[in-house]
Image (cartoon, helix red, strand yellow):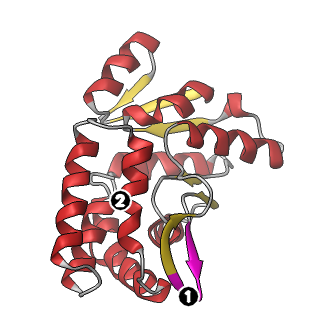
Amino acid sequence: MTINSSKPLILASYKNGLLNTRSLAKAIILSIIYKLRLKNPVKITGLMAKWLKGIPETSVEELSKKLVQQKLIYRLRPSIVQEIERHKKQGALTVILSAALPYVCNPIAHHLGMDDVICSTMEIVQGVFTGKPEGKICIDREKEIRIRQYCLDNSYSLQETYCYGDSYSDRFVLEAAGNPICVAPDQRLRKLSKIKKWSLME
């Protein structure tokens, strides 16, 4: 994608009355901290997830579906869409591996005709978010752990896997995959890709 899904989702939540001004301000500050890499991305993502506390799951699900249809689908990189189609024609299994929530990942996967989704999930009690992750957030080393387990459970070879990443936090899963590809990477990942001689897509 050309944008991170968390920012438009937070803004849409504010406009629809699911977030107050104080929570919006906190989310924006955390987004800036994340972008500037001033703190561990795992901790920042965990803190950002707290904005969901007290919000009904159905509200986020409905809002996310509209957001994907109206905005995010049109921001998908054409080069990535072409790559997905290329892999599908070759009979490959295509999977979204993301720190985002299923309410964003699932509609995009459906739109692209992808086979599966591996992503973060949040704890829900009586239909309402508690603000706590369910398990670990799918970012940083957790992405590598998840894809290794997925390949193991489904008898796939990780060395035959094509993995696409755009953030320095993706370095662990890119290192593990047999075919790592950096897509319009951030500055730190770009430098690492040159050292590792990983493929680059703009």
Instruction: Judge whether 71 appears above or below 160 on screen.
Output: below
Choose between 145 and 185: the one closer to the eye. 145
In the rendered view of the protein, which quadrant contains the C terminus? top left
- Residue 148: horizontal and vertical position, in percent? 71, 39
Left or right of 63 on screen, residue 13: left
Packing grade of label 1 (10 A; few <14, some 14-19, many >=20) is few
| Furthest residue toward top | 195
Q: Secondary structure under badge 2?
A: helix
Residue 100 position by quadrant: bottom left
Q: Quadrant of residue 5?
A: bottom left
In this rendering, is residue 164 above or below 2? Answer: above
From the top left corner, tell me how far across and down residue 147 is, in percent.
66, 43
Residue located 67% across and 51% down the image: 93
Q: Which residues are magenta?
A: 122-128
Residue at screen point 57% across, 78% down? 124
Q: Which residue is mark 1?
A: 127
Q: Quadrant of residue 46?
A: bottom left
Q: Amino acid at mark 1?
A: Gly
Mark 1 or mark 2, which has the lower sequence index?
Answer: 2
In terms of secondary structure, what is the magenta stretch mainly?
A: strand
Q: Position of residue 113 (x, y in %)?
A: 56, 65
Point 57% across, 28% down: residue? 179
Give the CA separation, mark 1 to mark 2. 20 Å
Q: Is 20 displayed left or right of 199 in the figure? A: left
Residue 190 vs 59, above or below: the answer is above
User: At x 34% / y 53%, what residue is drawn?
Assistant: 1
Query: Is residue 123 in the magenta section?
Result: yes
Q: How many marks?
A: 2
Q: Amino acid at mark 2?
A: Met
Q: Are marks 1 and 2 in contact (CB under 8 Å)?
A: no
